[in-house]
Image (cartoon, rainbow, N blue to C red):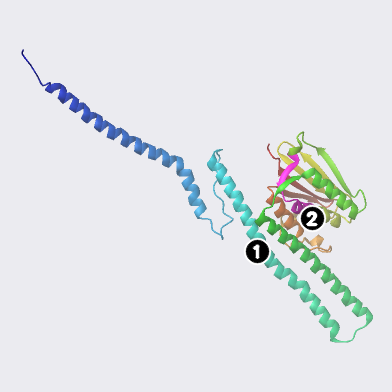
Amino acid sequence: MILVSALDEQNINQLQDMAKIMLVAFIIINGGIFFVGRWFAQRSLSPIDGLIRQMQRITVNDLHLRVEEGTGKDEITELAQNFNRLLERLDNAFELQQTFVTNASHELRTPVTSIVGEIEIALNKERSVEEYRHLLNSVLNDSERLNDTITGLMELAQSDMAYTRATLSSVMIDELIWEMHDYWNKRKDAGKLIIDIEQMPDDARALTIMANRSLLTIAFNNIVGNAFKFSDNQLVTCTLNVDDNYINISISDSGIGIPAEDIQKVFTSFYRSLNSRSFKGSGIGLYVTQKIIQLFNGTITVNSTKEGSDFLLKFPVSKF
């Protein structure tokens, strides 16, 4: 029996070279995948990093700032939009609080000081019946002004509370309008408030918005109340028109109108245009109304001439 053995050095060297090549290729390929993956991850997360940097710049003193929403339709854009809506509500809440404190201290002091001064004058010496009657009428006017101011401030405080608590429920706009119709026709002569339904959706759910019912009632009644007051109780028309995108509510009167230079100022707290100062009021109503409408993602605009004013409220139609 003859046994023969041999060592294939050439193939062994080839296998060793192949193993080295595979090891080097493994390291290079995995390293490349790691760095390429990291680069793609950074590129993918860069919008979030930018969003975080923008958020970090916003403090309690910079609530008016907003993050860039972009033009895409991805989750990051949706996140930015929701964050901006949150900032808007917080900004409005802080503004309402600051306005309440500032205006309360200013507007309440003026009529109280006037009342105290008039009473001191009356008590200074004996006066005639006619002089006392004149002083009492003046005190009565200041007291009514004080009452209007307190009422407006209470509405402002209620708006502020709603911003912080955000108690929302489904509100049917058409039902709210008919309730308003019944309320004002009991206060005024029947038929003074006219409801005009121009266009209604096929799906009744399109008339529903998420809102606070009591606050919306305050907003609507503020506009209708002003319409009656500044038109000397003439007819007021409320028109409801619902299209594919918006719930449109128009409240029109035939009153004294708003001067063109004052239209942008009527939603400022305690502002009253020159032609309206002969009427009783505090100048808070439209300011509160605008804040309430904005709270529920609506808008309010006004068109006015010497023949009357038209307030247009728009709420986005809910998508089901």
Q: In front: 9, or 230? A: 9
Quarter of the image where one finds residue 79: top right
Given the current orientation, which residue lies at the most extreme top position? 1
Q: Is residue 316 above or below residue 186?
A: above
Principal SS element in the magenta part? helix
- The verdict on residue 68 being magenta is no
Q: Residue 96: where, in percent of width, then height?
A: 67, 60
Which residue is at 13% across, 22% downward? Answer: 10
Q: Residue 24: where, in percent of width, then height?
A: 24, 33
Q: Residue 16: where, in percent of width, then height?
A: 18, 28
Q: What is the CA distance from the residue labelled 2 to the residue labelled 1? A: 22 Å
Quarter of the image where one finds residue 95: bottom right
Which quadrant of the rendered structure holds the N terminus? top left
- N-term-proximal mark, 2 vs 1: 1
Neighbours of disc 1 within 10 Å: few (<14), some (14-19), many (20+): few
The answer to whether residue 315 shows anywhere in this view is: yes
Q: Which residue is mark 1?
A: 98
- Residue type at the position of mark 1: Gln
Q: Is residue 119 above or below residue 24?
A: below
Secondary structure beneath disc 2?
Answer: helix
Secondary structure beneath disc 1?
Answer: helix
Q: Which residue is mark 2?
A: 222
- The verdict on residue 216 being magenta is yes
- Residue type at the position of mark 2: Asn
Boundaries of the magenta span: 206-220
